[in-house]
Each structure stands twice: as structure tokens, then as C-alpha cells.
Image (cartoon, helix red, strand yellow):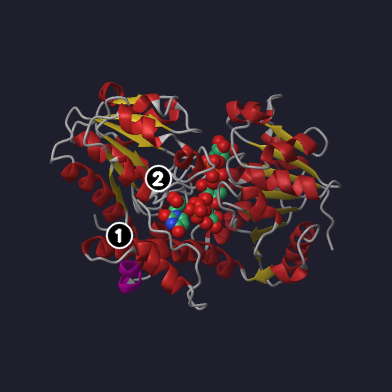
């Protein structure tokens, strides 16, 4: 079996950074270099102060402290790292296309292709190329064509090795993965490449957790895993709307169905809607692929998961407006949380963005507090929507660092992220700070209903009637 001595990973993002850190940590004999075209990002990965790493993940900085400069390196010298590596991971972003054919649904493979062409140009020895980015089924073939047709006649083996880590628990998910999926050709050289990658994970995971498949199954499984997870959330969220109209309580329903061992208890928390860089993008991708093959019923089926998610965000915003006597114009509404979930500074597709957008349409005055998300990021998220001018966004939205102070003279608080600290706040003081009646809209169901009602709040939470 081919022994891997040097690894290069292209893309130092939320996936590439933590994954390579863990590989370096668990495989001291392998030299791992993470490269990126974004110099600022690489500088941040190299920052002496580990609190400035570009990705926040519990446990990450300890691992980087242990490995960086020993067998883990962050660099912008992409060609050098490709040239020296035996194995190259591609972990660049694959956003949804914003133009041309497949606009709004298909994955934009521009960056993947650029990477493939660059590898082809630089490589002078045989390489194993691993797709880490989530890709539409059959992308491996495209990568292989580019490598074989433009390369220097060296041999390339392409593997698909999708990442299943969730943000906020990335390090744990990597260290104690449920499974590792490795897809590749069933040829002798393909099998050898799969074994080489399996041996890396074998440094810390047992054999029975490492699943080898053909390349298409591997690529498709990643999309399907995310689609199934998102589908559970949309399913329970659709029921949350029904619960609010009846006397049912969505948490009781979740618990009751989750105790059925065939259903299981996880991913049944009703919320203001799922966010994150993967769920929506991957389902749109699945929808697009199914449509491409003329499977319209299949694509409609999965598209509904997204439509319910949009409905849930809209419903939450509409409920705020109608509860505040059908007008929020000029009213101060405090957002607790902006990240798409707790324990991350990532805001991609966060429900908060869309709820804010809907309320800004009604000219609400929004004050945002999030323990990890920067002011710059929040404005960038709103500007990106292009719903209103940058000046208007800055006029209507304020970002603060003092969550309690922020509630002075506020009409309402909306909880958009389930940060633990929100539960521990002095809600009595908050109540005193606010205008009356004081409303709290809990999009994450994390606050103590009885306590808030006793303090005098008008407390609403997803999935329960008034
Ligand atoms: C990305 C994809 O979004 C996801 O589909 C896939 O599963 C894993 O890779 P993530 O790591 O969260 O996820 O993306 P991001 O944080 O945007 O990082 C990608 C990095 O690649 C960026 O730092 C970007 O600068 C870099 N990049 C992009 C390159 O180095 N070269 C390129 O050509 C394009
Ligand atoms: C997801 C997958 O879990 C992971 O396996 C894959 O590699 C990438 O996509 P991530 O997006 O980081 O990970 O977070 P996840 O924990 O799955 O949460 C996604 C969204 O769903 C968040 O907005 C979260 O708040 C929401 N969610 C999750 C719910 O609303 N209810 C739930 O019960 C669970």
C-alpha cells in the first residue's frame, strides 16, 4: 500500500481547517499543509494568539497549539504544497450558482475546476486527489477528465471523502466519527488509494467505521444524509405550526414520537428554521440533479423541505408583526443571536438574516447581540441580500456588545440562536428595561416559559399556542 508522508489541503475554511488539524494531531508522522488563496485567512490561522483563528470550534485551538509548526502548516504557497504532497484534499467552497444554467440551485464548480487545473499543471508525481467539498454526483469524473487531459502524464486517483462534521461540534465529530465514507474506483490502483486514505483515519478510528463504496454512492450519500437531516427539521417545523393552532405542544409531540426507536430522538427540535452552509445548498443540488434526469416528482418532494423552511422563517417574522399590533415601524426589536446555531461564529443561511430582512421591510429598528458574530459580518449578511441600500441597513440595524443594556426601551426580544448564556440572563432587569407590554419571541424554545410569564412578559415560543 502507498504510504502517505505529505498531505496538502486546498481550502482553509470551516471544513479544511478543523479536519486537517485533527489529521495532523492524530498522525504525527504525516506532514499536513493547508493552503488557501485568501492570505488574510492564512495569516489568521498562523496568528500567535489562538483566539484569532478564523474558525471558532470548541477544542480546535488546543489541537492547533499542539501541532502547528510541527507537522501542521498553513500557507499561501499553493503550488509548492501540491508539488510536494502524495495526497491532496480539495476543500474549497461550492456555493449555489448565482448565474446561468442552474442558477439558484446547481452548485458552482468554478473553484473546483480551478483547483483541478492547478493540480494538473503543477503535479510531477502521482497523486491521490480527495474531494472533501460536497459535490454534485459525478463531479469526480469531471475532475478526472481535467487532470488526465491537462496533466503531465502522471497518474491521478480520485477519491470522494465527504465530511459529516457539524459546526460547533466539529472536533468531537472528527475524533469520534459515526463513520468515514471513502468512495473510489474498484480498479487495483483505486483500491490502493482507498486503502491509503483509510489507513490515515485508521490512526484513530476502528475499521468497522470506515466504509468503502464506489465513487458515485459516496458523492450521493453526502447529499442524501444532509437532505434526510433537514427533512426531519422541516417535518417537525411543519407540525409546530399545527401545534400553535391546537392545544398540542410540539416538544411533547417530539418526545412522544422520538421514543419510538425506529424514529429516534435526534434532530426533532422545532426551531425558527435551519440554516448553515450545507442543508439548503445540498438539497437544492439534489433537486437540480433529479430534475436534470427528468425525475420531477423526486425533485418536488425534496424541494418541499426548503419551502417549509422558508415558511417557518416567514411565519416567525409575521407573528412578531401581528403580535405587535400589526406595526413594527420604528419599534426597537432586540435580536438575541445571529449565528445559524450556537457555538459557532458562522452565519451562512442563518434564519436570523431572513427574519431581520422581513422586519426591516416593515421598518423595524433592529438591535443585534451575538456573543461570537462580528458587526462587520452582520452588515455583510444583510447587504448581500440586496433588499435595501447599505446606508439603510446601517441606519435600521445596530450591533451591540451589551445584551442587557440593549433591551432599554425595546418593544420585543426575538431569540434566533440557542446560545446557553441567554438562559442565564437577569430577565427581571430585562423586563424592567423594556416598554410594556414586553414581548419575547423564542425561536429556539430555550427560555423558561413559566418564569417569563410570572415576570410579566408576553412570551411566545415556536410550537405552542398562547
Ligand atoms: C466548503 C464547502 O462549502 C462545502 O460544500 C464542503 O463540504 C467543504 O468545503 P467550508 O470549509 O465551510 O465548506 O467553506 P469555506 O469556509 O468557504 O472555505 C473554503 C476556502 O477555500 C476559503 O477559505 C477560500 O478562500 C478557499 N479557496 C476557494 C481556495 O483556496 N481556492 C479557491 O480556488 C477557492
Ligand atoms: C450539517 C450536518 O449535521 C453535518 O453532518 C454536515 O457535515 C454539514 O451540515 P451543520 O450545518 O454544521 O451540519 O449543523 P447542524 O447541527 O446539522 O444544524 C443545522 C441547522 O439545523 C442549524 O440551524 C440548527 O439550529 C438546525 N436544527 C438542528 C434545528 O432547527 N433543529 C434540530 O433538531 C437540529
Answer left or right for 122 relative to 383: right
Q: Residue 171 or 425: which is nearer the viewer?
A: 425
Q: Main secondary structure of the magenta part?
A: helix
Residue 152 vs 295, above or below: the answer is: above
Residue at 72% over, 47% down: 22
Q: Residue 33 or 126: which is nearer the viewer?
A: 33
- Circle 2 is placed at which residue position? 349
Residue 251 percent location from the top left of the image: 39, 63
Q: Residue 341 or 93: which is nearer the viewer?
A: 341
Residue 299 percent location from the top left of the image: 34, 67
Q: Is the residue at mark 2 in contact range of ligand 2, meaning its CB lies under 8 Å from it?
A: yes
Answer left or right for 34 relative to 382: right
Answer left or right for 21 relative to 254: right
Q: Is the residue at mark 1 in contact range of ligand 2, meaning its CB lies under 8 Å from it?
A: no
Mark closer to the chain start, 2 or 1: 1
Q: Does the magenta stretch include residue 299?
A: yes
Label 2 sits on a secondary structure element that is loop
Residue 400 percent location from the top left of the image: 41, 24
Q: If the image is split into quadrants, where does the C terminus sit?
A: bottom left
Local crowd size for mark 1, using a 10 Å CA cut-off: few (<14), some (14–19), many (≥20): some
Q: If the image is split into quadrants, where does the N terminus sit?
A: bottom right
For residue 322, say whether it is visible: yes
Label 1 sits on a secondary structure element that is helix
Residue at 42% over, 65% down: 232
Q: Report the Cα–Cα distance between label 2 and label 1.
A: 15 Å
For residue 112, say whether it is visible: no
Kindly identify which numbered label has been placed on residue 253. Answer: none
Q: What stretch is highlighted in magenta?
A: 296-301
Residue 323 percent location from the top left of the image: 18, 44
- Circle 1 is placed at which residue position? 308
Amino acid at each position: 500500500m502507498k504510504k502517505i508522508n505529505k498531505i496538502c489541503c486546498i481550502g482553509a475554511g470551516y471544513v479544511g481547517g478543523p479536519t486537517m488539524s485533527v489529521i495532523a494531531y492524530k498522525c504525527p508522522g504525516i506532514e499536513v499543509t493547508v493552503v488557501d488563496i485568501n492570505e488574510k485567512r492564512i495569516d489568521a490561522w498562523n496568528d500567535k494568539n489562538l483566539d484569532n483563528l478564523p474558525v471558532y470550534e470548541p477544542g480546535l485551538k488546543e489541537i492547533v497549539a499542539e501541532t502547528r509548526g510541527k507537522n501542521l502548516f498553513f500557507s499561501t504557497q499553493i503550488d509548492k504544497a501540491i508539488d510536494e504532497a502524495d495526497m491532496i484534499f480539495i476543500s474549497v467552497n461550492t456555493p449555489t450558482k448565482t448565474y446561468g444554467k442552474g442558477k439558484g440551485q446547481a452548485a458552482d464548480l468554478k473553484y473546483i475546476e480551478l483547483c483541478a487545473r492547478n493540480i494538473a499543471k503543477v503535479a510531477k508525481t502521482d497523486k491521490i486527489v480527495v474531494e472533501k467539498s460536497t459535490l454534485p454526483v459525478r463531479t469526480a469524473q469531471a475532475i478526472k477528465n481535467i487532470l488526465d487531459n491537462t496533466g503531465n502524464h502522471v497518474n491521478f486517483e480520485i477519491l470522494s471523502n465527504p465530511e459529516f462534521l457539524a459546526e460547533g461540534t466539529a472536533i468531537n465529530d472528527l475524533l469520534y466519527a459515526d463513520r468515514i465514507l471513502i468512495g473510489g474506483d474498484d480498479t487495483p490502483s483505486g483500491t490502493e488509494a482507498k486503502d491509503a486514505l483509510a489507513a490515515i483515519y485508521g490512526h484513530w478510528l476502528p475499521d468497522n467505521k470506515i466504509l468503502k463504496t464506489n465513487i458515485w454512492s459516496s458523492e450521493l450519500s453526502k447529499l442524501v444524509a444532509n437532505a434526510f437531516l433537514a427533512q426531519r427539521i422541516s417535518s417537525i417545523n411543519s407540525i409546530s405550526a399545527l401545534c400553535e393552532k391546537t392545544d398540542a405542544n410540539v416538544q411533547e409531540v417530539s418526545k412522544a414520537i422520538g421514543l419510538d426507536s425506529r424514529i429516534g430522538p435526534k434532530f426533532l427540535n422545532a426551531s425558527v428554521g435551519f440554516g448553515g452552509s450545507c442543508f439548503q445548498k445540498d438539497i437544492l443540488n439534489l433537486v437540480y440533479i433529479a430534475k436534470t434526469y427528468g425525475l420531477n416528482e423526486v425533485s418536488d418532494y425534496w424541494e418541499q423541505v426548503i419551502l417549509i423552511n422558508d415558511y417557518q422563517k416567514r411565519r416567525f417574522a409575521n407573528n412578531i408583526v401581528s403580535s405587535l399590533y400589526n406595526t413594527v415601524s420604528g419599534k426597537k426589536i432586540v435580536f438575541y443571536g445571529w449565528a445559524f446555531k450556537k457555538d459557532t461564529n458562522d452565519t451562512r443561511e442563518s434564519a436570523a438574516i431572513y427574519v431581520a430582512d422581513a422586519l426591516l421591510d416593515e421598518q423595524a429598528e433592529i438591535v443585534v447581540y451575538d456573543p461570537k458574530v462580528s458587526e462587520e459580518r452582520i452588515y455583510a449578511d444583510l447587504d448581500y441580500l440586496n433588499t435595501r441600500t447599505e446606508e439603510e441597513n446601517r441606519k435600521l440595524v445596530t450591533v451591540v456588545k451589551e445584551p442587557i443594556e440593549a433591551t432599554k426601551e425595546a418593544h420585543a426580544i426575538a431569540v434566533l440562536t440557542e446560545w446557553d448564556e441567554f438562559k442565564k440572563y437577569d430577565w427581571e432587569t430585562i423586563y424592567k428595561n423594556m416598554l410594556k407590554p414586553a414581548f419575547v419571541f423564542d425561536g429556539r424554545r430555550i427560555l423558561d416559559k413559566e418564569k417569563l410569564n410570572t415576570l410579566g412578559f408576553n412570551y411566545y415560543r415556536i410550537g405552542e399556542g398562547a
